[in-house]
Image: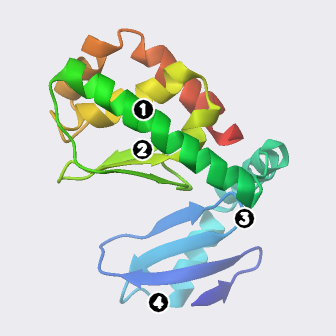
């Protein structure tokens, strides 16, 4: 349900949960998730009480979108095809080094993730990884394959990543700092 406060328009989503959450997308969309019985006025107050935080996120989104390139459908299709080939090759190589197996590899254009690993061992990757330096793509591949050994982000998980990529922290930092430019 769309709601309007003094300063913002937002989407109110009801869910089976105990607390409210607030999300600001790059495009300026504001979403509040709230327990079913939360009065709409409480959600309005929640949004307004986070006004400064929301305004910072809105400005950051504008800046990111101003520098982020847009891709034609042809560029997307070519990128996905290239990504499928490169990612299959890199997964095969690193899986051998790590002694793990995996299921299928799917290439998508996720908004918030570079990769993921399902409980069944299926791997998902963002096609835009092929636009980044090779060592960053390799970091994401090793990260997801490490989930075949540890389905969490525990110390043991990071130890597995570090066995293969001793400089993973540097690669991870690069992705945090530069990933939104893609």
Mark 4 element type: loop
Disc 3 crowd rating (10 Å Cα; few below 14, some 14-19, many 20+) is: some
Q: Which residue is mark 2?
A: 115
Residue at screen point 36% across, 89% down: 37
Q: Which residue is mark 1?
A: 140
Q: Of marks 1 and 3, which one's residue comes earlier in the chain?
A: 3
Q: Quadrant location of residue 96?
A: top left
x and y percentages locating residue 44 in the rendered image: 60, 80
Disc 1 crowd rating (10 Å Cα; few below 14, some 14-19, many 20+) is: many
Is there CB contact under 8 Å for labels 2 and 1? yes
Mark 1 element type: helix
Disc 2 crowd rating (10 Å Cα; few below 14, some 14-19, many 20+) is: many
Distance Cα–Cα, label 2 vs label 1: 7 Å
Q: Of marks 2 and 4, which one's residue comes earlier in the chain?
A: 4
Residue at screen point 51% across, 25% down: 136
Residue at screen point 66% across, 53% down: 76
Mark 3 element type: loop
Distance Cα–Cα, label 4 vs label 3: 24 Å
Disc 2 vs disc 4: which is toward the camera?
2
Disc 1 vs disc 3: which is toward the camera?
1
**According to the image, what is the colour scheme of the structure?**
rainbow
Q: Of marks 2 and 3, which one's residue comes earlier in the chain?
A: 3
Q: Which residue is mark 4?
A: 39
Quarter of the N terminus within the rendering = bottom right
Q: Is 176 located above or below residue 45 in the figure?
A: above
x and y percentages locating residue 45 in the rendered image: 58, 76
Q: Of marks 4 and 3, which one's residue comes earlier in the chain?
A: 3
Q: Which residue is mark 3?
A: 28
Count of marks, rendered view: 4
Q: Of marks 4 and 1, which one's residue comes earlier in the chain?
A: 4
Disc 4 vs disc 3: which is toward the camera?
3
């Amino acid at each position: 349900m769309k709601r309007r406060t003094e300063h913002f328009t937002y989407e109110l989503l009801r869910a089976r949960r105990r607390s409210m959450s607030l999300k600001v997308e790059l495009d300026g969309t504001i979403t509040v998730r709230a327990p079913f019985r939360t009065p709409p006025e409480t959600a309005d107050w929640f949004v307004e009480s986070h006004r400064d935080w929301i305004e910072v996120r809105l400005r950051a989104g504008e800046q990111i979108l101003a520098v982020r390139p847009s891709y034609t459908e042809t560029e997307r299709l070519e990128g996905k095809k290239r990504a499928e080939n490169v990612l299959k090759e890199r997964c095969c190589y690193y899986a051998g080094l790590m002694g793990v197996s995996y299921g299928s590899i799917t290439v998508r254009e996720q908004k918030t993730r570079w990769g993921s690993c399902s409980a069944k061992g299926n791997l998902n990757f963002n096609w835009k990884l092929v636009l980044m330096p090779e060592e960053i793509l390799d970091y994401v591949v090793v990260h997801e394959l490490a989930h075949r050994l540890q389905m969490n982000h525990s110390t043991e998980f990071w130890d597995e990543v570090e066995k293969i990529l001793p400089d993973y922290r540097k690669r991870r930092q690069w992705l945090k700092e530069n990933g939104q430019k893609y």
